[in-house]
Image (tube, rainbow, N blue to C red):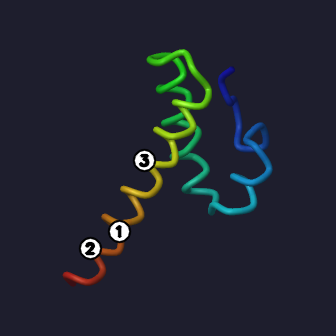
Amino acid sequence: MLYKSNEDLPLDIQTRLSEAYQDLYRAAFNSAIDWYGEASKAHQVALSAVKMHSAMERNAVVQN
């Protein structure tokens, strides 16, 4: 199942993540579901993408 918009995302993702991170989650999930074919694996991949991006942003702020 692909998510066409952020409104289609699970409620916990909508409430926990900013709009930008919802976009990232949705793109990563949609890519991973095509690749793995499993929603649970795609969810893990999407959350990992959000966490990695968040960590990269924090590191960029600290370095500046």
Task: Determine the secondary structure under disc 3.
Answer: helix
**The C terminus sits in image quarter:** bottom left
Q: Nearer the viewer, residue 44 or 19?
A: 44
- Locate residue 7 relative to residue 23 in the image: left or right: right
The numbered disc on residue 49 is 3
Q: Amino acid at mark 1?
A: Glu
In the figure, residue 30 lies in which quadrant? top right
Residue 53, image x, y percentages: 38, 57
The crowd level at tag 3 (other Cα within 10 Å; few <14, some 14-19, many 20+) is some
Residue 22, image x, y percentages: 61, 50
- Locate residue 13 relative to residue 41 in the image: left or right: right
The numbered disc on residue 57 is 1
Closer to the chain start, of discs 2 and 3, is 3
Q: Nearer the viewer, residue 29 or 4?
A: 29
Q: Residue furthest left?
A: 63
Q: Amino acid at mark 3?
A: Ala
Q: Nearer the viewer, mark 2 or mark 3?
A: 3
Task: Determine the secondary structure under disc 2.
Answer: helix
Residue 60, image x, y percentages: 26, 73
Contact (CB < 8 A) between labels 2 and 1?
Answer: yes
The residue singled out by tag 2 in the image is 60
Residue 1, image x, y percentages: 69, 20
The numbered disc on residue 17 is none
Task: Determine the secondary structure under disc 1.
Answer: helix
Report the number of discs: 3
Closer to the chain start, of discs 3 and 1, is 3
Q: Amino acid at mark 2?
A: Ala
Instruction: Please name the residue shown 36% across and 56% down the image.
Output: 52
